């Protein structure tokens, strides 16, 4: 459970960085999202999920080998 909470907290830190550093650009990007086709958003979301899973997998396997 502590690993999950640490991962959740780290995700929130990374999610908050653009809003803190570039709020105007985040707003303009949010206005562009409806123009992006649904299939493109799905592909981007799926790719990000796969990358996230790979990072977690390699991070855990490296931590176990130390």
Image (cartoon, rainbow, N blue to C red):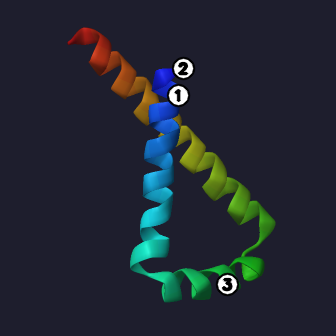
Q: Which residue is mark 2?
A: 1
Q: CB atoms at circles 3 and 2 under 8 Å apart?
A: no
Image quarter (top left, top right, bottom left or bottom right) of the C terminus: top left
Q: Give the label on residue 32, or none.
A: 3
Alpha carbon distance from label 3 to label 2: 37 Å
In the image, is residue 9 above or below residue 63? below
Q: Which residue is mark 1?
A: 4
Q: CB atoms at circles 1 and 2 under 8 Å apart?
A: yes
Label 3 crowd (10 A; few <14 / some 14-19 / many >=20): few
Q: Residue 36 falls in which quadrant of the image?
A: bottom right
Image quarter (top left, top right, bottom left or bottom right) of the N terminus: top right
- Left or right: residue 41 versus residue 28 is right
In the image, is residue 3 above or below residue 35? above
Q: Nearer the viewer, mark 3 or mark 1?
A: 1
Q: Give the label on residue 37, or none.
A: none
Helix, strand or loop under label 2: loop
Taking depth in this image into account, of 51 and 39 the one nearest to the observer is 51
Q: CB atoms at circles 3 and 1 under 8 Å apart?
A: no
| Rendering coords of residue 13 (x, y %) | 44, 54
What residue appears at the point 44 percent right and 30 percent down from the top-left corner?
Answer: 56
Alpha carbon distance from label 3 to label 1: 32 Å
Q: How many marks on residues?
A: 3
Q: Residue 33 falls in which quadrant of the image?
A: bottom right
| Rendering coords of residue 40 (x, y %) | 70, 64
Name which of mark 3 and mark 2 comes first in the sequence: 2
What residue appears at the point 59 percent right and 43 percent down from the top-left corner?
Answer: 49
Taking depth in this image into account, of 28 and 49 the one nearest to the observer is 28
What residue appears at the point 51 percent right and 89 percent down from the top-left corner?
Answer: 24
Q: Nearer the viewer, mark 3 or mark 2?
A: 2
Alpha carbon distance from label 1 to label 2: 5 Å
Helix, strand or loop under label 3: helix
């Amino acid at each position: 459970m502590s690993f999950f909470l640490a991962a959740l907290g780290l995700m929130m830190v990374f999610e908050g960085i653009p809003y803190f550093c570039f709020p105007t650009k985040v707003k303009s990007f949010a206005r562009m999202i409806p123009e992006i086709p649904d299939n493109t958003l799905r592909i981007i979301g799926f790719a990000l999920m796969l990358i996230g899973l790979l990072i977690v997998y390699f991070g855990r396997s490296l931590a176990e080998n130390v």
